[in-house]
Image (cartoon, coloured by chain):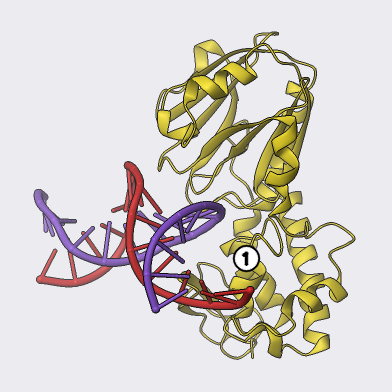
Chain colours: A yellow, B red, C purple
Amino acid sequence: MPELPEVETIRRQLAPLVKGRRIVTFDVLDRRLTEPRATEEVGKHTVGKVITGLGRRGKYLRFELDDGGTLVLHLRMTGRLIWTSPEKIDEEHLRLLIRLDDGGLLAFHDMRRFGTAAYLGQSEAEEYWRRFGLEPLDRRFNSTALGKICQGRKRPIKPTIMDQALIAGIGNIYADESLFRAGINPVRAAGDLEHEEVTALCSEIKDTLREAIKLHGSSIDTYADTSGQRGGFQETFRVHRREGMPCPQCDSTILKTKVGGRGTYFCPDCQS
DNA sequence: CGTTAGCCCTGCTGGC
DNA sequence: TGCCAGCAGGGCTAAC
C-alpha cells in the first residue's frame, strides 16, 4: 500500500517524464475517482495545461500546472501509476488515462477503487494543504517537534504517528517497522514516552523511510512503481506481516494485534 | 476537543 | 472441491 516511500519513488521516476509536457487528454474511466467532483470538471481544468513540476505532500502526488493549479492524485490502498504506451495499455482496473503532448501515457489503475483525483485552483491550494502535519524527512521534523506532538496525548503512539494532521506520510507498514526499531510498544500512550524514546523514534522513522525509498518502497499486495516493478523493502521487514515468525533481535515470536483499528505487528520482548 | 466506529471497495484467505 | 463470510486498510464523516 503506497505510503511516503512508495509515492516518493513514483514521484522521482515520473518527474523527468512529465515535467514541461502538456496534458492532451484526461480520460476518466471510473467516475468514482473524482468524487465528490464531476469528472468533467477535473478534466476541464487539466486538459491543455503544462505540467511545471511534480511534488509530493505526505502520500499525495501533486502535478503542478502552469495556471497555478494542481492536479492531486492519491493511490490509497491499491492504486498504481504506470508509465505506458498505446500498444501496451493494460485495461484491468484502469481508472484514468492521461495523454501528454509527446505521446507519453500515464495510466492510473486501482483494483479497490479507493484512489482519488482532484484539481485544486491556486486559491484553494493553501487551505487544502494546511490540514497536513510535518513531513517526516523534513529537518523541521526532529525530536523536539515529535515531543510536542506526543506531549499530553493519551492515545497510543502508533495512531499518533499515523495521524496525517500531525505527521504526513506514515502508514501502517512504516509505523510498525519504526516502532520496532525504536523498541516502543505500539499501544503505549504517546504522552508517556520518555525523552530518549521520542528521540529514538524520530530517528528510526527517518532511517526506515530513507531505506525504504532506496529500495523503491514495499510491495505486499499490488504496489508497483511506474514501470510495474515491485519494491524491495518488504524483504527487510522485521515485524510487519511476520506474525508467528521469530523476532530478528531476540527470537521471540512476533505477535499480531489491533491498535487504532489497524493490524499491528510487534515483538512482545523488544518493544516495551 | 479528542477519540473512535463505520463506511467505501474488491480480491484473497480460511474454515467448514 | 466448492462455497462464502470475513479480512485488509487510508481517509473521511458521524457519533460519542
Question: Of A255 and A197, which appears nearest the observer?
Answer: A197
Mark 1 residue element: helix
At label 1, counting other C-alpha atoms closer than 10 Å, the crowd grade (few under 14, some 14-19, many 20 or more) is some
Q: Amino acid at mark 1?
A: Met
Q: Quadrant of residue A10?
A: top right
Depicted A260 relative to depicted A83: above or below: below
Image x and y of residue A245, in percent: 50, 76
Can residue A222 be seen in the rendering of this structure? yes
Q: Does residue A40 appear to the left or right of B12 in the view shown?
A: right
Q: Quadrant of residue A137?
A: bottom right
Question: Of A178 and A220, which appears nearest the observer?
Answer: A178
Question: Of A238 and A56, which appears nearest the observer?
Answer: A56
Name the quadrant of the C terminus of chain A: bottom right
Depicted A265 relative to depicted A94: above or below: below
Image x and y of residue A75, in percent: 55, 42
Give the number of marks.
1
Depicted A52 relative to depicted A180: above or below: above
Q: Chain of mark 1?
A: A
Q: What residue is drawn where x is 78% and y is 22%?
A: A19
Q: What residue is drawn where x is 63% and y is 52%?
A: A3
Q: What residue is drawn where x is 63% and y is 20%?
A: A45
Residue that extends furthest to the right in the rendered view of this protein: A139
Can residue A245 be seen in the rendering of this structure? no
Question: Circle 1 is placed at which residue position?
Answer: A162
